[in-house]
Amino acid sequence: MRNTVIDVTGLRCRYGDFEAVRGVDFEVVQGELFALLGTNGAGKTTTMEALEGLRAPSAGTVRVLGGDPVRDRAALRRRTGIMLQDSGFPADLTPAELVAMWGAVSGRRAGEDVLERLDLAHRRDVRVKQLSGGERRRLDLALAVLGRPELLFLDEPTTGLDPESRRRTWDVVRGLLADGTTVVLTTHYLEEAETLAHRLAIMHEGVVAVSGTVEEVLAAHPARIAFDLPGDLDVDVLPMLAGDVLHRPSGRVEVRTPELQDDLAALLAWATSTGLRLGRIRAHHASLEDVFHAARTTAGASA
Ligand SMILES: Nc1ncnc2c1ncn2[C@@H]1O[C@H](COP(=O)(O)OP(=O)(O)OP(=O)(O)O)[C@@H](O)[C@H]1O
């Protein structure tokens, strides 16, 4: 059984009269990557700030590495790396200077060449203002992982990065996970969450709409089959299926099904036996994108 690193119960956060986080519960265990997803304004950053000790909750409790993130912030900071959305480094300093400075401030000195690890060694003496956007983001990550923290908060770490830089960042994060670091990630890239996360929560308007392991969340959502039905045929002619059938005016048929393999096999066997050719057949399991959109609709409908 792995140790609980973060325990959030009934978390609420207010900005004046507006309640941005409205009763959130989750747990993060040692060595996992927990992704916090949601639309703009869902409350992810506010929740992260409460975990980082930058914001006191208006109600509920937050425990991080056994401590209170606000009260024990100084002690927790040595054990925690934080990559904010916008770091705002002094533009006249160099990566080498920032690493030295940040090591002293955070109490987490580098035991290795962190710039090397983030492919920034050749840029160590260049001023920050001369770095590209992607290099600056990698520098943000380098400073967050300095001294190998036990717990790492990554707030949209790959926003604005090209696909290659994004993959390189994923490799660094995977390396940290393999070493036992616990990671909390917010991202708008669902592929990033699907690739890296062990568990996730999708927030919508201040509440958690969906949570679980990536496999659980995807399995709870129907798969889809789509095809064009030839001529003037109606969906009445289709064989019995486990899923719900929708016939679009364009003639395209969509089946949302919990039994992808059975329904697909039944449709193909039926088409073959009747001599019909189904056009543009697509069949796929639910993606995180499907779950994300459904979470918004469901949470919006019940709000
Ligand atoms: N300082 C503030 N004062 C008042 N309202 C705020 C403040 N910061 C955030 N909010 C509001 O709280 C809500 C949640 O904001 P938050 O930044 O936590 O969302 P988010 O999920 O991180 O969004 P994004 O994906 O855009 O970063 C939003 O409606 C936002 O407008």
Image: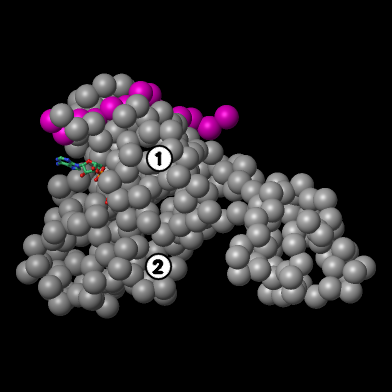
- Residue 66: x %, y % from top left: 35, 26
Q: Which residue is mark 2?
A: 166
Q: Residue at x 28, y 27 (%)?
A: 12
Instruction: Report the image quarter containing ligand 1.
Output: top left
Q: Is mark 1 within 8 Å of ligand 1?
A: no
Relative to 160, is 21 above or below? above
Q: State the colouring used for the structure image.
A: one colour
- Identify the main secondary structure in magenta: strand
As drawn, the label of residue 217 is none
Query: Is any part of residue 30 visible from this angle?
Result: no
From the viewer's side, name the closer residue of 69 and 194.
194
Q: Is residue 150 left or right of residue 76?
A: right
Where the N terminus falls, by quadrant?
Answer: top right
Does residue 216 appear to the left or right of 241 in the view shown? Answer: left
Instruction: Residue at 75%, 62% (x, y): give it.
Output: 234
The residue where tag 1 is placed is: 300
Question: Quick one: label 2, few (<14), some, or many (20+) residues within 10 Å?
Answer: some
The residue lying toward the viewer, choosing from 246 and 108, is 246
Q: Is residue 3 magenta?
A: yes
- Residue 149 occupies quadrant: top left
Q: Which residues are magenta?
A: 1-16
Measure the alpha-carbon separation of dots 1 and 2.
32 Å
First-in-chain label (1 vs 2): 2
Toward which corner of the image does residue 114 lie, by quadrant?
bottom left
- Name the residue: 48% across, 30% down: 3
